[in-house]
Amino acid sequence: MTYDYDVTVIGGGPGGYVAGILAARQGKKTCLIEKERLGGTCLNRGCIPTKVFVKAAEELSALRNAEAVGIVGVQKDAVSIDMQRLQKRKQSVTQQLVGGVQGLLKAAGAKVIEGTATLKDAHTVVLADGKEITSKYFIIATGSETLHPKSIPCEGKEVLTSTELLNLDVVPGSIAILGGGVIGIEFAYALSQFGSKVSVLEMAGEILPMVDAEIAAKARKSLEKGGVRFYMGAKVLSVKNGQVTYEMEGKEQTLQADYVLMSLGRRPSTEGFGAREVGLEYSGAAIACDESLKSSIDNIYVVGDANGKAMLAHTAFKEAEIAVANICGGQRTMRYDCIPSCIYMEPEIASVGLTEAQAGERCGDDVKIGRFPLYANGKSLIDGGMDGMMKVILDSKYGEILGVHLFGAHTTEMIAQFATAMQSELTAEEVLETVFPHPSVSEGLGEAFLSAWKGSAIHNVG
């Protein structure tokens, strides 16, 4: 049977556009269908625009602390954020990157169709205008959407998702952030620097439940120094006209704010385009697939947030690469144990592998843990980053790297080398043969490995 295309990608976010580029570069006749803008949530209303806000927050913080590094003449009480200018910068950055994605797809020879696509059968989709497209293979990359729990009734124009918040042209006087996960914490950092009165309500006992608990606690304390107020163990009951009703310590209480951000997580966007109807198997809200990214139907692959495995843009990039390789005859599988995770605040958080709690569950007492505080690191002292810490978790028998957890300046730029080390199965002994540059924040990693494997660091007691 002949088909209109060899590969058709549904969704143009990080997983989708990378799949489209790579399939076309492999000589496959490729089509990509996107209902909104190329780049998906990450590029248009997630990772990238959020980091534009974070960068502005970092610059504000630097100006307010200029006197500490010998710069005089900056009136720290006078510096503020111009949200309209910030919005223009955000739009400029996202538009440039969207244009770059468009150019890459065009250069590769992939056809881009704007609109919706509904699966009719394993080899056919129907566009909004009724036109049918047939394809030998499909790659589903439909992304994710903000989670709105039905158990929390919400009313009022004051309730925002991250999408609406990123479009505000005024600094909120006050904001209640529901959820202490990555999205909530990055906004808490940025908005507190902008001058908002920020309150974070989190049902768990600590923020950032996916992060090593020791690092999460340090991050919370750092944010508290910046004025963020946390309500831990708070169960949100309802939101109406900016008033949040919650239960904490057995008592029902209320909190009033100008805006309320819903950041209780995201769920795969996998409904409404025929996936269930054609027989694809699901795992919860996600479309199930194996480690080759193949779904329950042999010619359909699933990448990115739609498969729910590790909902990060860089995960989607790698999944797209592997799915296309397998469509082209390869036999590759995806590894999820060495995927780094980054949280952008000041200081930054970066991690890969097991947390201390997870390592304890898996290995019991057969682990070694090393820590190095960044107040003992020269570059961190110069940068003013006194709160940071490097933490490594090792297998006590062979020195296998089980987890690396960083809290400090520039750590999101360092974590990839330890993802590589874990992927390559390097041991602590081999890492300790590395010469770390001086002065650098990364030196703290060598010290943390020394602390874990040899029992003590050089530049810290204990």
Image: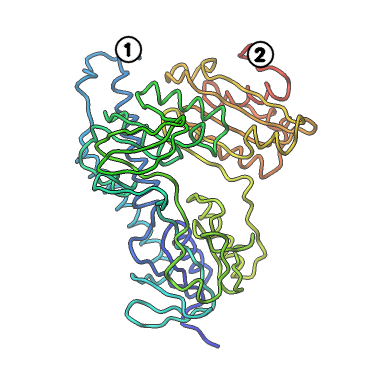
Q: Position of residue 201 (x, y in %)?
A: 40, 35
Q: Nearer the viewer, mark 2 or mark 1?
A: 2
Residue 9 against residue 153 in the figure, above or below: below
Q: Nearer the viewer, residue 201 or 460?
A: 201
In the picture, measured across the screen, residue 260 lies left or right of residue 366, that is left
Element at badge 2? loop
Q: Nearer the viewer, residue 246 or 157?
A: 246
The residue furthest bottom is 1
Task: Classify the position of the C terminus by image quarter.
Answer: top right
Task: Classify the position of the N terminus by image quarter.
Answer: bottom right
Residue 287 against residue 422 in the figure, above or below: below
The amino acid beneath tag 2 is Gly
Q: Position of residue 403 (x, y in %)?
A: 64, 35
Q: Nearer the viewer, residue 105 or 89?
A: 89
The amino acid beneath tag 1 is Gly
Q: How far apart in space, not on screen, are marks 2 and 1 (Cα)?
A: 33 Å
Occupied quadrant, residue 365:
top right
**Residue, x 63% and y 56% (percent of image)?**
334
Residue marked by disc 2: 462
**Residue, x 64% and y 32% (percent of image)?**
356
Residue marked by disc 1: 70
